[in-house]
Image (cartoon, rainbow, N blue to C red):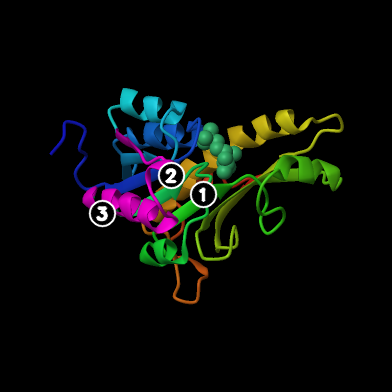
Amino acid sequence: MSVNEQPGKKRIGVLISGTGSNMKVLAQACQNDDYPAQVCLVVSDKPDVKGLDTAREMGIDALAFPRKDYSSKADHEAAILKALDEADLDFICLAGYMRILSGDFIKKWSGKLINIHPSLLPLFPGLHTHDRAIAAGCKVHGCTVHFVTEGMDEGPIIAQAVVPIMPDDTSDALAARVLKTEHILYQRALKQLANGQVRMTSDEKSEFLNSLDENDQTDQNDYLIS
Ligand code: GRF
């Protein structure tokens, strides 16, 4: 057992492709004794990203699997899946992982694989969500944590948070505002999942099993909903 092992907690793997600020916030939340999960492995498809350094500084195993090192998407995913299996994980969080996972990967981790997306799904799946929300004239934007299913950004919603769009907002300003809210929402949604308060049913719906604990209830205000 490694020094950082926290027995009794759900074991989490996080897949990233870049900065890893969501990963960092999840890992920080996991350091609290009463948080029901621990980040055991961080995987990136890019070798030189900040998120890998951050994970290592926090004492978390962090592995890079550059796509160019593998002759096919299937081989690339097989290598990642092997590392995830070896880490004996309960759940996987996608946090800015910029590759589309195959159906086989998603099926293998069905109900145990979640993602954070920077929009109020089902609005604006895919890329450039902040530009698109501004261009559409939306007054609010936000982020969504959802189970991952085969349709891109289509899986059942676990939690959402809303942020305002200001009249003079640039895409960058809005992205920064949303990212701050992502950091609150993701660690809260992972807590629900690890506590068994939400699960995905066989017909791919989110089922909420227990009420939130007292501390989480206080988060249930106008902009942060699950
Ligand atoms: C976040 O906005 C996330 O929603 C999106 O990519 C960004 C990743 O940021 N999928 P970070 O790497 O967690 O800082």
Farthest residue to the front: give it: 71
Q: Is mark 3 on a helix, strand or loop?
A: helix
Does label 3 or label 2 sit earlier along the sequence?
2
Q: Position of residue 109 (x, y in %)?
A: 38, 61
Give the residue type at disc 3.
Asp
Based on the displayed image, in which of its 4 quarters is residue 152 positioned? bottom right
Residue under numbered circle 2 = 67
Q: Where is residue 51 in the image (x, y as percent from the top left)?
A: 43, 30
Q: Residue at x 45, y 29 (%)?
A: 49
Does label 1 or label 3 sit earlier along the sequence?
3
Residue 5 seen in the current view: yes
Q: Is residue 77 magenta?
A: yes
The circle drawn on residue 85 is 3
Quadrant hosting ligand 1 = top right
Closer to the camera in the image, 65 or 225: 65
Label 2 CA crowd tier, 10 Å (few <14, some 14–19, many 20+) = some
Classify residue 101 as left or right of residue 168.
left
CA gap between label 1 and label 3 equals 19 Å
Q: Which residue is drawn at 56% across and 53% down?
A: 159
Q: Is the magenta stretch mostly helix, strand or loop?
A: helix
